[in-house]
Amino acid sequence: MLGYVKPCKPELKIKDYEAYRGYYCSLCKSLGKRYGVFSRLFLSYDVTFFIVFVYGLKKDFTPKFKKGRCPFNPFKKCNYIDVKTDEYEFASAFSVIMTYYKLKDNIIDSSFLRSLKYRIVLPFVYFKYKKAKKNNPLIDSILSESIKKQAELEKNKCAVADKAADPSAKALGECFKLYSDSKDNEELFYRFGYCLGRYVYLLDAFDDMEKDEKHNSYNVFLLNGYSSESVIESIRMSINELILCLDLFSFYNNKDIVSNIIRNGLEMQLNAVKMRKEGSK
């Protein structure tokens, strides 16, 4: 995921924002402890959302944060939660594996000169990836299959947005489904993850249109003459369905944080991309 799934801070209570930051800093800590200091660079808001979401649905869980210091800024105080959990193991491995595949994709999509920075970093990430894959082969299986199908669609110049977004959406759907609290709820978890993955893919494609056009890279919205209005409408469809799904979950923690991100944060990021585009004209 690419940093589009974050809270709308002005609409979030201070205590909830502090809790969110605690989950975020804890993911950074988990990455460092499991995969080394370099892996902290793989930290993202999107994976933090996954942590906030799954902890929010844990009936037997009460968040207990401890004060600490940021290892990169000793003057900054942080809140940390226990990261020796399956949830943080999953999120950390997902971050590493996704970063590895994203780098490989960037190399394929870039010219030789533009890809040099990715080629230099890739060997370092590869060693982290091997460890993450060994610890979590299921995540790697889900993501590698998604990347393979995505590459086929791009090779064939898929011009249908829903089809282009489908592999990424399915991958995230499968990841969320793993944390379903019952067999009866698996479809709900899958659909929520699917719509979130679709939102991220389409918003990223919308955000990258000018860059992809400049470098002659694949972008589904450049192939069929999509208007900005139709793209925005399609992305909002995912937001609306996420909101409908949200009301079907039983939250024991973090309900206001998750609701803020889905109801306000996603729209805020869409508007930010829209304004950047209008400002560049």
Image (spheres, grey):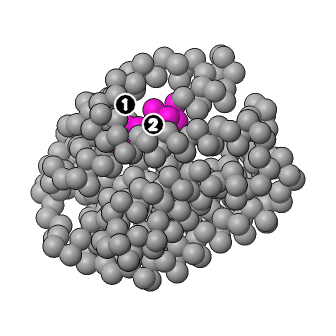
Magenta span covers which residues?
A: 93-103
The residue where tag 2 is placed is 99
Q: Residue 71: which quarter of the image?
A: top left
Between 103 and 184, the residue placed more toward the observer is: 184
Task: Bin the neighbour count of mark 1 within 10 Å (Cα to Cα): few under 14, some 14-19, many 20 and up.
Answer: many
Which residue: 56% across, 40% down? 147
Q: Nearer the viewer, mark 1 or mark 2?
A: 1
Q: Are marks 1 and 2 in contact (CB under 8 Å)?
A: yes
Q: Looking at the image, which is closer to me, 50 or 116? A: 50
* Upstream in sequence: badge 1 or badge 2: 2
Name the spot of residue 37 as percent of width and height, x first: 27, 30
Q: Residue furthest right?
A: 225
Inspect this view and state whether residue 86 appears: yes
Disc 1 target residue:
129
> Is residue 86 magenta-colored?
no
* Whether residue 120 is situated above or below residue 60 in the rendered picture: above
Left/right of residue 172 with respect to residue 230 in the rendered view: left
**Circle 2 — which element?**
helix
In the image, taking residue 33 as reference, residue 160 lies left or right, namely: right
Is 13 in front, or is 165?
165
Residue at screen point 47% across, 65% down? 190
Q: How far across and how far down the image is residue 188, in percent?
A: 45, 73
Please tell me whether the stretch drawn in magenta is mainly helix, strand or loop.
helix
List x then y, in percent, for residue 205: 68, 49
- Residue 102 coordinates in the image, percent (x, y): 52, 36
**Residue 97 lies in the magenta-colored region:** yes
Instruction: Tell me the amino acid under the disc marked 1.
Output: Tyr
Q: Residue at x 70, y 43 (%)?
A: 153
Amino acid residing under circle 2:
Thr
Total marks in image: 2
Label 2 Cα neighbours within 10 Å, binned few <14 / some 14-19 / many ≥20:
many
In the rendered image, the residue lying farthest to the front is 183
